[in-house]
Image: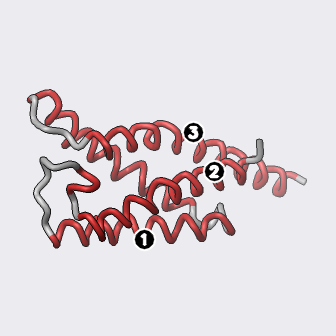
Amino acid sequence: MSDDLLLRLAYAANILILLPVVTALHWRGTAGVFGPEVADSPALRLLVAALWGAILVCSAIGLAWPRVMVGILVLQVVYKSIWLVTFVLPAWRAGDPVPWGPALTFVPIVLLWPVILLRNLSESSRSTISAVCW
């Protein structure tokens, strides 16, 4: 499978996940995404909707130019890993409520996107080395 195709699949997954989520944030507030245990806050809702909306737009662009937009996948791995380790894991261990919807969506992204990125990096490196050597 071509590495560009893997990148496009990652961008398509982002779009499929984020389109209903960003819509829900605008129409149903934070409870529609994070669950009733998270109090609705217009500032939080708009901040998260803006971030996820930007990732959605960048993912749409990534369908056309997959290698150019690879940084958006890196951003997702970094911020989602930090959130899972610093918020979800401690809350879960303490028996506090955890927004399982986002948490369970983040886990496969944190596990799969690095594999796609490393495959892309290795193909890019091979192409560069081949061009320099020949």
Circle 2 is placed at which residue position? 9
Amino acid type of the residue tagged 1 in the rendering: Ala
The answer to the question of whether label 2 and label 3 lie on touching residues, with beta carbons closer than 8 A, is no
- Residue underneath mark 1: 54
Q: Is residue 122 left or right of residue 86?
A: right
Protein image colouring? secondary structure
Residue drawn at the location 28% of the way across and 54% of the way down? 33
* Quadrant position of residue 45: bottom left
Determine the residue positioned at 14% across, 27% down: 93
SS at mark 2 in the image: helix
> In the figure, is residue 104 to the left or right of 94?
right
Tell which of 121 and 6 is nearer to you.
6
Q: Badges 2 and 1: C-beta atoms under 8 Å apart?
A: no
Residue 49, above or below 20: below
Q: Amino acid at mark 2?
A: Leu
Query: How many neighbours does mark 2 have within 10 angstroms: few (below 14), some (14-19), or many (20 or more)?
Result: some
> What residue did someone put label 3 on?
115
Q: Nearer the viewer, residue 2 or 125?
A: 2
- What is the x, y in percent for residue 10? 58, 51
The residues tagged by marks 2 and 1 sit, at their Cα atoms, a distance apart of: 18 Å
Q: Label 3, label 1: how many angstroms apart (C-alpha)?
A: 23 Å
